């Protein structure tokens, strides 16, 4: 049973490494990774900000606008707990801590943008 667990962990680790390289394939140093993931995060944040503007334009009602704000605040708290908390703590003491934290934020931000696009597909695109 232990061999299966080790094999599963190895496969998940390889998958994670491949996903990491897909976002920033040319990293050679920690500073390269920090720069690349920082840029990826900035791009993702800009795309999310634009998507939120689009979502807010769907309905001008005050209750909808307030709920968009609350939803976004809850999501931001989750990202903070996941990336600045869990991921950063996991890599604490390692040079990969900052790139891993930035990568986490970039990926979750990209996912949030895609989720909003999916959730509001009809009013946004039709």
Image (cartoon, grey):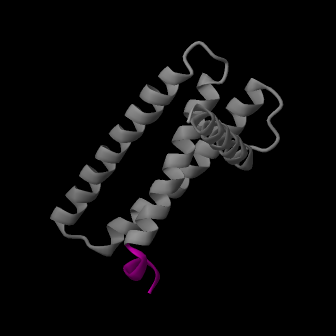
Residue at image position (67%, 37%) is 10
Residue at image position (54%, 39%) is 104
Front residue of this view, candidates 15 and 101: 15
Q: Which residue appears farthest toward the front when viewing the image?
A: 1
Residue at image position (65%, 24%) is 96
Q: Relative to residue 47, is residue 24 drawn left or right?
A: right
The answer to whether residue 39 shows anywhere in this view is no
Q: Is the magenta stretch mostly helix, strand or loop?
A: helix
Q: Which residue appears farthest toward the left when viewing the image?
A: 63
Vertical placement of residue 76 versus 120, above or below: above
Residue 99 included in the magenta stretch of the image: no
**Quadrant in which the N terminus is drawn:** top right
Where residue 115 appears, as percent x and y from the top left, is 44, 62
Front residue of this view, candidates 7 and 117: 7
Where residue 54 appears, as percent x and y from the top left, is 41, 68
Q: Relative to residue 63, is residue 97 drawn left or right?
A: right
Residue at image position (49%, 47%) is 108
* Residue 73 sits in quarter: top left
Where residue 48 appears, as percent x and y from the top left, is 48, 55
Front residue of this view, candidates 18 and 122: 18
* Residue 62 sits in quarter: bottom left
* Total marks placed: 0
Q: Give the range drawn in magenta.
A: 120-126
Where residue 78 appears, as percent x and y from the top left, is 36, 40
The answer to whether residue 30 shows anywhere in this view is yes
Vertical placement of residue 27 versus 113, above or below: above
Q: Relative to residue 40, is residue 118 drawn left or right?
A: left
Vertical placement of residue 18 versus 92, above or below: below
**Quadrant in which the C terminus is drawn:** bottom left
Front residue of this view, candidates 6 and 25: 6
């Amino acid at each position: 049973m232990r061999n299966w667990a080790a094999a599963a962990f190895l496969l998940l680790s390889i998958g994670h490494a491949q996903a990491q390289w897909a976002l920033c394939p040319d990293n050679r140093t920690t500073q390269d990774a920090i720069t690349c993931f920082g840029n990826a995060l900035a791009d993702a944040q800009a795309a999310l900000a634009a998507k939120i503007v689009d979502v807010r334009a769907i309905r001008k009602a005050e209750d909808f606008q307030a709920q968009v704000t609350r939803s976004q605040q809850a999501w931001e708290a989750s990202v903070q707990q996941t990336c600045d908390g869990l991921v950063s703590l996991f890599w604490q003491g390692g040079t990969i801590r900052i790139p891993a934290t930035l990568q986490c934020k970039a990926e979750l931000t990209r996912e949030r943008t895609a989720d909003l696009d999916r959730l509001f597909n009809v009013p946004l695109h039709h």
